[in-house]
Amino acid sequence: MKQLAPSIVTTRARKGRKFISIVEAAYNQAELSQDEAQRINDTAGLADHIGEFIAKNRVTDKFKNEEVPSTYGYLSGYKPEGQDLDRQIEVLQGLFPGLGGPNLDYLQRVKSGAIRVKKPAEKFFAIPNIWKEGGLPAIFGATYSEALQKVLDKIFETREGKFQNYRVGQIDEQHIRQPARTIAFFKQLSEAQGNPDILIVPAQFGILHRGRSVRRAAGVFLKNELHIGSFGTGIMLLTHTERLQEYDDLWIDTGDEFNDPDSGVRFGGSPYFRFSGGGVRFVANRVGGAVAYYGSASAFLPKSLLFSQKHSDGCFCFYLIKIYSRLLMSFVERIQPPNILPISSMFA
């Protein structure tokens, strides 16, 4: 299949040249003297001003009213910096006997600094690879919901019972699913790392999108960013037990799509982890609520993989299209005029 070219706009592209022409017009209109022009050239900060303008205006206005100011953060001791993959891997292999390891060559490159975390990711996280070619590792069951249930059970165990699942009986394929974008991401990441049992994933624990609704966060994601999902977020909580230890900790939206039987919209909700009543809670709510003490956890695909030439199936975009074709909404979903759309609709 023909490879798709990167859709990255530079100053050589028509849109880029338009931007430069606007800057040129403003500069010419100022009618600067020699001294004034030199003074501007010698003054630091121009690139920062332009960068801030681009950052502010590059995101969509869709659901922009679903964002509120937030000062909530990581209060329980979790540190977003530092490298501790060996510890995380040891924890996971202790919790899930029979789980293999990561790609050792890739792990060594990360530990040596040859591969580094790039902002806005906080650090590398070790995530069991339930997306690997050939199916889930047997210890996680046969479906995504079974794997998630096993993670929730381990959270209950490691928190010594201080955990409650408010969706008991609804952790199944009829009620919870991953967004197509998330599946496509992890399948490509898995292939790039050689389909190991544990993936090394650059991610952030929620603070980047604090105060945003789930679908607003999805709307402002970077091209290589996506919701990490309930399974991935649960694993991060298992390897970072210091996260979510008090009520004022930032709660975590996972971005999975939840089919609430009490709602008229199929898969119009999304699960999240919170701390209340002395323990961690797994709950699901509407995707349109913007609350200061929530933030979406997200992962980042290395940009070099977005348009990797080694994938016979094409780039990440093709993976996404292929996954969507397997997850078409039912006839009822298509004809229903929902007032809250599933998260996957952000990328349709």
Image (cartoon, helix red, strand yellow):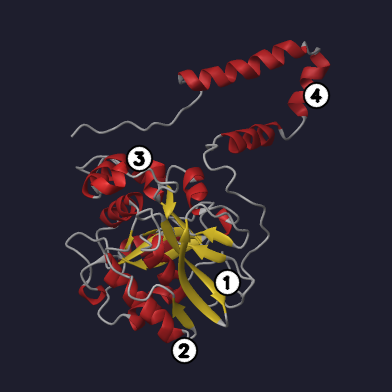
Q: Which residue is mark 3?
A: 348
Disc 1 to disc 4, C-alpha distance: 45 Å
Q: Residue 240: in sight, yes or no?
A: no
Tag on residue 39?
Answer: 4
Q: For marks 3 and 4, give the one nearer the viewer.
A: 3
Task: Provide the secondary structure element on which disc 1 rests.
Answer: loop
Q: Is residue 321 above or below residue 167?
A: above
The percent position of residue 314, horizontal first and vertical second, equals 24, 40
Amino acid carrying label 4: it is Arg
Residue at disc 2, secondary structure: loop
**Residue at 35 percent of width and 82 percent of height:** 95
Residue at x 29%, y 32% (from the top left corner): 4
Residue drawn where x is 60% and y is 44% of the image? 65
Disc nearest the viewer among 3 and 2:
3
Spatial separation of the CA atoms under disc 3 and disc 2: 41 Å
Say which quarter of the image contains residue 58. top right
Q: Which residue is mark 1?
A: 78
Which image quadrant: the N terminus? top left
Q: Which residue is mark 2?
A: 160
Left or right side of 111 for 207: right
Q: Residues within 10 Å of mark 3 (few under 14, many from 20)?
A: few
Mark 2: amino acid: Glu
- Observer-nearest of 287 and 332: 332
In the rendered structure, which disc, 1 or 4, sits on the residue that comes first in sequence? 4
**In the rendered image of this protein, does residue 195 appear above or below residue 221?**
below
Mark nearer the N terminus (4 vs 2): 4
Say which amino acid is labelled 1: Tyr
Residue found 21% across the figure and 31% down from its top = 2
- Residue 327 visible from this viewpoint: yes
